[in-house]
Image (spheres, rainbow, N blue to C red):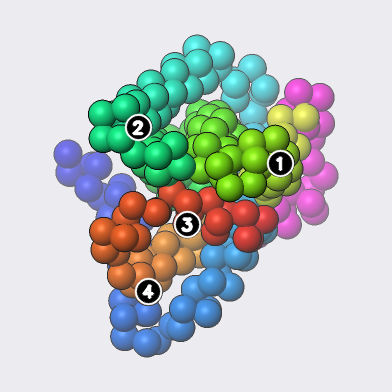
Amino acid sequence: MISFVLLSLPVFAVVALGWSAVKTRLASPAAIDALSAFSFRFALPVLVLRLIASEPLGQSFNPRFFAGYLAGGCLMFGLVFGISHLLQRQNPPTAGARATTATVSNLGFLGPPIVLAFFGQHGAGPLAMAIVCEVMILMSLGAVIMAGARTGSSRAGSLILRSTICSPVVVAIAAGGILAGGGTALPGPLNSFLAFLGASAAPTALFAVGGALAAQRIDHVIGSAVAGARWSSWSSIR
């Protein structure tokens, strides 16, 4: 237990630092937005790409882990959607928002620093599989349900598919998998550059998460629409 706390403490300390910076007005919400965009568009994709590319593809992708993670997510999604839609008589977009909120985590920002702190480089493969399950499948499913009633399911599905495929983290996972599958080693200078840039991913992402928490007021209205807002934020910074 003590080891767990000691490993977790730096991670959540940076989140608390970002929260405190915004609360005390040492950092503005605009600065947090810029930091979040930098982390999501550049630092996190580079970190994920380099980690996956440095491991044999057979070690990064485990079909049993992927199937189990996806099955658990689909089960949770289906249960929450069914309870909201069938028992509580919520319309499909609202039920889809609740199901997405219950299923999809903040894995893109919090996942890399936490997983790497506990498992090191060997955690890159499971992290990538979890991101694919949540972002490419579960979040897209929820977004189609939420947007389908307004824009038409076919148009919504096309927009969401394009947005998901163009997500920087998803592109990085695909590129890293291609390099690992082909056994291509990154040139020394390029590897050093990626390592230098990727090292900034964890602190900037965690600081941005803390700042975003400080800048928001959570009430029952925001809580009911959090999944829709999360998807809008994801799409706006892609």
In the image, the segment drawn in magenta is 179-201
- Between disc 2 and disc 3, the foreground one is 2
Which label number is shown at residue 85?
A: 2
Front one among 196 and 18: 18
Give the residue at x 46% y 78%. Answer: 29
Contact check, label 3 and label 4, Cβ < 8 Å: no
Q: Against 216, is 147 above or below?
A: above
Question: Which secondary structure, mark 2?
Answer: helix
Residue at image mark 4 = 215
The CA distance from mark 4 to mark 1 is: 33 Å
Q: Earlier in the sequence, mark 3 or mark 4?
A: 4
Q: Residues within 10 Å of mark 3 (few under 14, many from 20)?
A: some
Quadrant for residue 117, please give it: top left
- Between disc 4 and disc 1, the foreground one is 1
Q: Residues within 10 Å of mark 4 (few under 14, many from 20)?
A: some
Q: Hey, what amino acid is under mark 2? A: His
Position of 1 with respect to 233 (left or right) is: left
Q: Earlier in the sequence, mark 2 or mark 3?
A: 2
